[in-house]
Amino acid sequence: MRIDKFLADMSIGTRSEIKKLIHDGRVSINGEVVQKPNYSVDIDTIVVVDDIEVHYSQFEYYILNKPSGYLCTIDYSPNVLQLIKTHRKDVMPVGRLDKDTEGLLLLTNDGQLAHKLLAPKSHVNKTYYVETDKNIPASAIETFSKSIEFEDFISKPAKLEIVSSNSGYLTISEGKFHQVKRMFKYIGCEVTYLKRTSFGPLKLNDLAVGEYRSLSEEEINMLKGSD
Ligand code: URA
């Protein structure tokens, strides 16, 4: 790729600022000043700008413990991207959580992986911790284990683990709009608190609300392998 694109992707400046940096002799590779914005580099090249090394990062993967009140659509504020410090402008949430839902949100600029994980045939398991306004009937375990017919879709069998009279973990393998809230409504309960605790092989564990971290190589490989 061109060196000006390399530097723009790493948010070193706008295209015209980068052109000026190069023109002013502030950009070098292996001690040699680079004078041309179309100079060819690859993702392993270490480019130095004003004595500071710039490494190219092609793909970034994060999990965020989304706080309630944040949107997954980036055109509105406050949104989840405002919580992530990254140079890349193409990092996006993979799927959505409702504004009032907390918990595990994957964000990446790896469009191919995002597409694969969101494809309906992927059946990625997602577990939600749920609190409800009323007691969850024991029969809900069986009700959820079978398909339920909604106006616009038929849910796939899901697994409910009851924790207390009004809380439990629900694992679903799809992600229809308001799906968990609608499934509980079907059994006569309103969801009063919702938090996603796992997404495929990823677990939220003790990540604090509003905190995020990069995925490990192992987690990325597990995600890429998960069907
Ligand atoms: N199901 C819901 O109802 N809301 C979410 O945010 C996620 C799953």
Image (cartoon, helix red, strand yellow):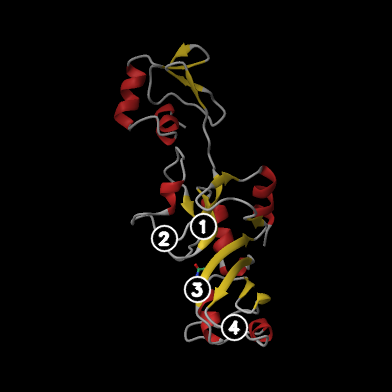
For label 1, the residue is: 94
**What residue is at 39 percent from the left and 59 percent from the top?**
73
Q: CA distance from mark 2 to mark 4?
A: 26 Å
Q: CA distance from mark 3 to mark 1?
A: 24 Å
Label 3 is placed on what type of residue? Thr
In the foreground, 142 or 146: 142
User: Is residue 118 toward the left or the right of residue 139 in the image?
Assistant: left
Query: Under tag 3, what secondary structure?
Result: strand
Three-letter code, disc 1? Val
CA gap between label 1 and label 4 equals 32 Å
**Quarter of the image where one finds residue 3:** top left
Q: Position of residue 95 (x, y in %)?
A: 50, 61
- Residue shown at the point (66%, 75%) measured from the top left: 164
Q: Amino acid at mark 2?
A: Gly
Find disc 2 in the rendering and name its residue.
69
Residue matched to label 4:
135
Q: Tag 1, which secondary structure? A: loop
Mark 2 close to ligand 1, CB under 8 Å: no
- In 3D space, how far apart are the residues under numbered discs 4 and 3 (Cα atoms)? 12 Å
Q: Provide the secondary structure element on which disc 2 rests.
A: loop
Amino acid on which the number 4 mark rests in the picture: Asn
Question: Which label number is shown at residue 180?
Answer: none
46 relative position to 13: left or right: right
